[in-house]
Image (cartoon, rainbow, N blue to C red):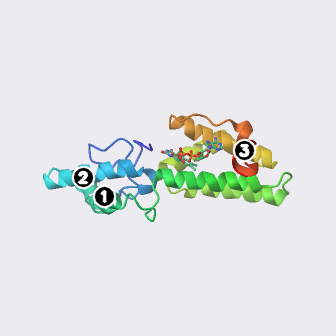
Amino acid sequence: MAADTREPQQQPNELPKGFVIGKDGKPCRSCTSKKDFASWAQMTKSSLKSGAGGTGAATGAAVGAAAAASTFSQALPTDDCPADVETLGRSTWTLLHSIAATYPKTPSVAEQSDLKTFMGVFSRLYPCWVCAEDFQVYMQKERIQVGSRDEFGKWLCEAHNAVNVKLGKDKFDCSKWEERWRTGWKDGRCD
Ligand SMILES: Cc1cc2nc3c(=O)[nH]c(=O)nc-3n(C[C@H](O)[C@H](O)[C@H](O)COP(=O)(O)OP(=O)(O)OC[C@H]3O[C@@H](n4cnc5c(N)ncnc54)[C@H](O)[C@@H]3O)c2cc1C
């Protein structure tokens, strides 16, 4: 889902849609879904077998990917593998929305400052670099709201929705963010 054509462009000509190379020129697991990574492994293995590789850095990336991806694809049914873009995303949203859920209703100046700092650093360190770049742009456009739990919760919900829209998913109803992440649903299914 994280298909991206931005720099670095050290990719062989034919890549499965959604496969992303990291800034180090190697396959970026945390930017790519398991499915796309496995497709890349198959393609790379076949192309290496037939002797039709790319050149220079692209070939290096391909060889690295073949080795990494063959292990990765064999290990698909287990959970103890490096996170792909979806597992990483799901876990991260859980952390972020849970931070919103426990953020004070009336935060102190220090708490507001901590949250701003955390989110700024987070947006630079997020392991999927294409996701991180877009999130930084989002944060520049939509200034973070940290004045209260509800303010931050809704800001984060809208930020998550921006990613949902980018990925072609439905928007979440942000009036329900607390039910989803703090109180549990009114129908009692979380009790
Ligand atoms: C900062 C960030 C940027 C990302 N950028 C990309 C990207 O560029 N490309 C890419 O492929 N993936 C990206 N991801 C990952 C992506 O957002 C998803 O996490 C991943 O695709 C798995 O999606 P999912 O359908 O399991 O649900 P997720 O989107 O992970 O959501 C988890 C749960 O949160 C709830 N939820 C959904 N929307 C909202 C909302 N708006 N507010 C509150 N709760 C909500 C739902 O109950 C859902 O099941 C990013 C993740 C993060 C944290």
Q: Name the residue nearer the viewer: 157 or 128.
A: 157
Q: Callout 3 environment at 10 Å: few (<14), some (14 to 19), or many (20+)?
A: some
Task: Give the spatial CA distance, label 3 vs label 2.
Answer: 46 Å
Q: Could you tell me residue 102's position as x and y percent? A: 76, 56
In the picture, the disc for residue 44 is 2
Badge 3 marks a residue whose secondary structure is loop
Tally the numbered discs: 3
Q: Name the residue nearer the viewer: 140 or 132.
A: 132
Q: In the visual, does 125 lie left or right of 145?
A: left
Report the mark closest to the observer, 1 or 3.
3
Q: Callout 2 environment at 10 Å: few (<14), some (14 to 19), or many (20+)?
A: many
Q: Residue 41's image quarter? A: bottom left
Residue that label 3 marks: 185
Residue that label 1 marks: 65
Badge 1 marks a residue whose secondary structure is helix
Report the mark closest to the observer, 3 or 2.
3
Question: Is the residue at mark 3 in contact range of ligand 1, meaning its CB lies under 8 Å from it?
Answer: no
Q: Residue at x 71, y 56 (%)?
A: 99
Which image quarter has ligand 1? top right
Point out the residue furthest to the bottom here: 80
